[in-house]
Image: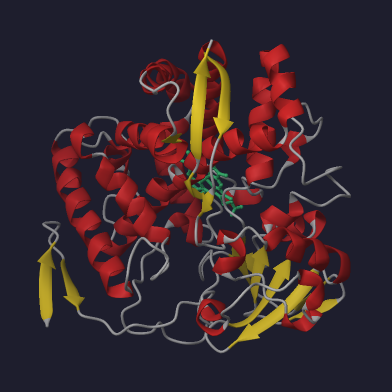
Amino acid sequence: MSEAIDTTAGTTLENTAAPEFIRPGSEQDHSKKGPIPAASDVPLDEINPVWNRLFSENRMLEYFERLRREDPVHFNETEVAGRYWSLTRYDEIKAVDTDHKNFSSAHGITLGFPIDQPLPEGALDVSMFIAMDQPKHDVQRKTVSPVVSTRNLAGMEALIRERTCEVLDSLPEGETFDWVDTVSIELTTRMLATLFDFPYEDRAKLTRWSDVATAVPGGGVIDTEEQRREELIECLVCFTQIWEERKKNPTGDLVSMLAHGEDTKDMEPMEFLGNLILLIVGGNDTTRNSMSGGVLALNQFPSEYEKLKKDPSLIPNMVAEIIRWQTPLAYMRRTANNDCTIGGKDIKAGDQMLMWYLSGNRDESVFERGEDLIIDRQNARNHLSFGFGIHRCMGNRLAEMQLRVLWEEIMERFENIEVVGEVERTFSSFVKGYTSLPVRVTRK
Ligand code: HEM
């Protein structure tokens, strides 16, 4: 069955029922059942950290610890993804991240299909500036970056604070509730609705699209690749209507900027969709999981929570430390443009390079007691979580501001936030996050 979707932008998309395919990175979810073995029990060359279950069951850190120690530039090859390397030490990660001439983003930023093979039928071929090289990347980034300029951010702080206070004031006391849904998702979704000037009452759609964009079939969010494709095309259709409106009446939001930007106004639908997904996911999952991660970390390290209660002026540094500790995006991918050598290993042109920020952020040669949250850590700001180089996170200061305001308002109101049940984690080796965090709050 084939159904044409009119995007109203003058373009027609074929939404054909597509066959299922195995997404690179989910191979082990299909092949490995039963309990996850201890990292020390697995032969080194059989270790493959791109395994969603390692993350949902919170077992990845022991694997990264071993790789940093024994094989910091680690090779894997699978039938679906081809050849790829895992970089697990700080220095090598930073070296590749800052070398955009030799390591391209244009073939994708998560583990993908080998670059010399066509995409399987049914794969959505979207294009976004995080997955572009110069000069196109720079032009598109420049078009949307004013939304997070110092001036715009300063103007947004009051609104962020107002919405944060509203959400915190409505929390029940003496009752268990889910911090993920009630606080983290609610606050980041409100923020996204503001950035896109999206109908406020429909804002839950933004959360849904963000979840769908990074979801793996069978992981609890979507059942099939086909469903993913359909929902993302719905997102495109909805935003194309908004685009048409903003073309006539710009409101200063992100869509208006894209619709009027000299270099973005003629974007193809898949490029528009790609950049939307980038801004939705970029500003959603990451900040959301840092909001939950902070609460969890302060519960796991109660002496740090005490430190914070005695000295709330530590909040700005603590925010950086939470982002280091959480590392909401576990890795970013590059592709080698040329044959080269890294850490004594011979990399071939076309090899995929996974920069495991999560592991670099635990590298003991840079971060002492790297697995611990230390809210007054001197070099917390040197974390890798926002990347480095030309793709360094565009929304980093917005995210830091949201988290700073959240913690300032939490410390005003609550004596304690206690984690009282099992934490559930996202089924993804890319988005490192939480699906549930049961808590109870005690007001001051
Ligand atoms: C704690 C929160 C966040 C984290 C950890 C994070 C992390 C990242 C990372 C790792 C990259 C890629 C860096 C690289 O490849 O070198 C990135 C890029 C990006 N982020 Fe964020 N992000 C966060 C929040 C946000 C927010 C709130 C926005 C919304 C505006 C945003 C928008 C973007 C965009 C547009 C890019 C692409 C930049 C480019 O390619 O030039 N991010 N982010």
Please tell me which residue lies in front, 262 or 237.
237
Labels in figure, total = 0
Quadrant for residue 274, please give it: bottom left
Which residue is at a point 31% across and 79% down the rendered structure image? 122
Give how far across and how far down residue 183 sits, in percent. Answer: 42, 32
Quarter of the picture containing the N terminus is bottom left
Give how far across and how far down residue 33 sits, in percent. Answer: 56, 80
Give how far across and how far down residue 157 sits, in percent. Answer: 45, 19
Query: Where 90 falls versus 23 (above or below)?
Result: above
Quadrant for residue 214, please give it: bottom left
Quarter of the picture containing the C terminus is top right
Residue 373 seen? yes
Left or right: 158, with 198 as reference point = right
- Which colouring convention does the figure follow? secondary structure
Quadrant for residue 417, please give it: top right
Which residue is at a point 36% across and 66% down the rendered structure image? 126
Left or right: 317, with 223 as reference point = right
Residue 262 seen? no
Please tell me which residue lies in front, 129 or 437.
437
Give how far across and how far down residue 65 sits, in percent. Answer: 80, 61
Which residue is at a point 11% across and 75% down the rendered structure image? 3
Query: Where 313 falls versus 83 (above or below)?
Result: above
Please tell me which residue lies in front, 262 or 128.
128
Which residue is at a point 57% across and 51% down the rendered structure image? 391
